Amino acid sequence: MDEFEEIKATFFQECDELLADLESGLLIMESGSRDAETVNAVFRAVHSVKGGAGAFGLEPLVRYAHVFETLMDEIRAGRINADTELVRVLLRAADVLADHVSAARTGGEADHEASAAMVAELEACTHGAGAPAAAQDAAPEAFKPTPAATDDMDFGFKPAAVSILEFDAPPAAQAASWTVTFTPTPALYAKANEPALLLRELARLGAVESELDDHQIPPLDALDPEGAYLTWTVRLTTDADEGAIRDVFEFVDGDCELAVERETPEAEASDGPDIAALLAAAKADPVEAPAPSAPAEDGLDIAALLAAARQAVEAAPPQAPEPARAPTAQAADPVAVKSTSAPARQPAAEPAHVQATIRVDPERIDRLIDLVGELVINQAMLAQRVAAHGFAPSSDISMGLDELEQLTRAIQDGVMAIRAQPVKSVFQRMPRLVREVASQTRKQARLIMEGEGTEVDKTVIERLTDPITHMLRNAIDHGLESPDDRIAAGKPAEGVVRLAALHRGGRIVIEVQDDGAGINRPRVRQIAIDKGLIAPEAQLSDEETDNLIFLPGFSTAGAVSDISGRGVGMDVVRRSVQGLGGRISISSRPGEGSTFTLSLPLTLAVLDGMVVDVAGQTLVVPLTAIVESLRPKPGEVRPLGPQGAVLAVRDTFVRLIDIGCALGFRETSIRPEEGVVLLIESEDGGRFALVADAIQGQRQVVIKSLEANYRQVDGIAAATILGDGRVALIVDVDALVAVRREPARPAEFVSIAAE
Amino acid sequence: MSEPQHNSTSERRELIAFCIGEQEFAVDIMSVREIRGWSPATPLPQTPAYMRGVINLRGAVLPIMDLAARLGLPVNELSARSVIIVVKVGERLIGLLVDAVSDILSITEDLIQPTPDVACDRVRSFVRGLISMDGRMISEIALERLLPEMETLAA
């Protein structure tokens, strides 16, 4: 059942988005803002997960989400006040919900104990505030998986057949009977709502007996595939009030005709509903009729597919009406329809942060990026050739080319923006990690995130998760002290971990900073000596000592804890970062905390560069690294030592580095006064000045990897292709400094220093 | 790289032969992606002298190796006949700069003779074997050994 699996995969992708919305909503609530819109968004996220899970018969997930939803509903209705304590509970509840989702995705089972404990907690919160009957009733019901309830889930949209069992049971003492008449309008289907789900929701309130009125269905040739012809009459025996019943139809309010009437008890008598119910179920969808027994063996799939197929028929555009088409062929599409229109389900105004997304195979985007790169180069070559033929700039052909250039740039910007994504997708998983690690280590930690909107290429994003996870675990496990120690040290009991992303020097920099005790240097040094990583008499600077933790075979934790020690040391993190062309470094101040800095290239992202001439070569210097460019006046350049020189910039002196010499393109530096000087700010905040022969201009360039076909080259970050079709190299300004600063240290530290 | 199977001596395979100076060499045609004229390469810093630099191959950055320099032969002036043979080594594409393409050979494995001891170490390590054909001597290049630093870096 490939189509079914596809639909299911779509559901889980949606779940990821919903869970992210849920968490961000809760975090907004935690920060003190509890406006109705946020609470509503949280409620809807839980509700949508539950709804989707119901369609796939993921019973444990549905049951758990139901309890969660019930509590959120109470909060939404203002019957329970969501104080900080409660929001924390909700955050943990969201974690458990995520566990349920991932368990359902892998076909495994969620941690029953954790789930049950959470359920108890949520129910305590719900009932603690004197919840009304509807909620009280719904929660326990959802937790007694009576055969009826189970069938209900398995058989998708056949509530009528299911209800019989429940109906046979004696109704609850104070239960009342209601007649609910429900007539969907075409608008309801157009918004991808599913009557079966609503009816099933209704069945949760009590025993139901439903009847389908299909008299409105015209002959097949007159059937409007997008029309709505069905009316359900449901007799419901429940102790819930009218409000609870109407709540079921809340999301389709205005898209259906709904009547809820209270009945007199004697009207309940029923004459053998079996046949009527089965007929109702069969008539609910003409396609289903030939295979009434199919759901029994493969009920879940077929029921879901049929439901999807029916939606497709109802939602299909008028020019393609073919009601009798095979249901499976349509299976994939309706869900797409459903997913895009899902946010429109609520008539209320949508919060601004709802993301409408499409999913595209990344390979198609890669291909597109390559092609656009070619287009840009070709366009530039064409322009050069036209100019060479002596066309005037005001001629038709030149003006046409100008327009082509602008269009090409616009396309390039657009395509690049597709692949560049904010690091938010990685960051949003981190609050949960921090909560878990903090509770496992019995520490109190607060996570502050900055720069979530920083954009980086998708391929880089995917590989950021592991290093960040590890650095955060490390910061909490090794960095932060226990609450008691912190108070003793005069700090607040709650430690602060800061996770920040920013662009610097044409790279993305991720910082993980804690306000813990800092690196215990004597201990690090002792461990390194004990493990034979350094000689006992080695003289190391503080910085070098800190960097020892990146050496293979180093682990500071006395006992390997299951937090940081997942068999992965910082050396592995460093190696994986280096594999991406990145670097990782640490700085630490005793008593004040440590900062891990991870810098990665923005591979294949666009780069704003300064194109310069150096020793007959064309090079690109990342614009982000350049503070200013200037032509030094005589007297501003001062010789220092036999070869070196410094530049006086206002009142400070900065080191001058000739790019040509640093890269080995020439032996002796040109006179800086005759060239141009680019003032650079390096990754660690230091300043220096690069000397080039001339500046060609500023340009946006496409980054091409050198590693793909060759290897990393010192001093070069990547390559690009210029308008004339030739390859130009992009300078790695930080590496240029390292190239120049010949390390005169013991051999074993060269690798650290060369970072 | 897919090495041809040596157990079947009658299996024919094709080589592309080319000249460097007075000598003839060849590479397996299955490794060759394309042959193109010389275009000026952008030099790379901190690289061995036999790396001529990189060129733009339809949007990809293609490193160019001067095969004469790599084999320790005198480096000739570039001429109109100079060509770049784009070969695939492992997962990488690399361009080999040679003087001219001369022939396409169809051989069987038993025509390949081991390299005699007289050759210098460098040539011996880069040459898989010698082929005698129509009075010519053609050396087959072992592509995977041309770039030892790639092997270690790829690991």
Image (cartoon, grey):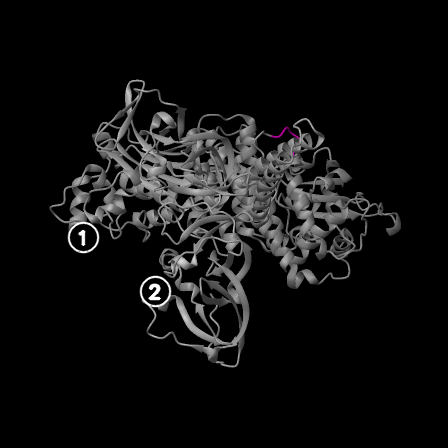
Crowd around label 2: few <14 · some 14–19 · many ≥20 (10 Å):
few
Question: Is there any visible trace of residue A266 in the rendered image?
Answer: yes
Residue corresponding to mark 2: B122
Q: Residue B141: name its quadrant.
A: bottom left
Q: Is residue A698 magenta?
A: no
Q: Nearer the viewer, residue A452 or A444?
A: A452
Q: Nearer the viewer, residue A52 or B37?
A: B37
Residue A376: x and y, percent?
A: 59, 39
| Helix, strand or loop for disc 1 | loop
Name the image quarter holding the C terminus of chain B.
Answer: bottom left
Chain letter of mark 1 equals A
Q: Is residue A348 magenta?
A: yes
Question: Is there any visible trace of residue A119 in the rendered image?
Answer: no
Q: Is residue A447 left or right of residue A545?
A: right
B105 shown above or below A405: below
Q: CA distance from mark 1 to mark 2?
A: 41 Å
A399 shown above or below A149: above
Q: Which residues are magenta?
A: A346-350
Report the amino acid beneath label 2.
Arg
Q: Nearer the viewer, mark 1 or mark 2?
A: 2
Residue corresponding to mark 1: A531
Chain letter of mark 2 equals B
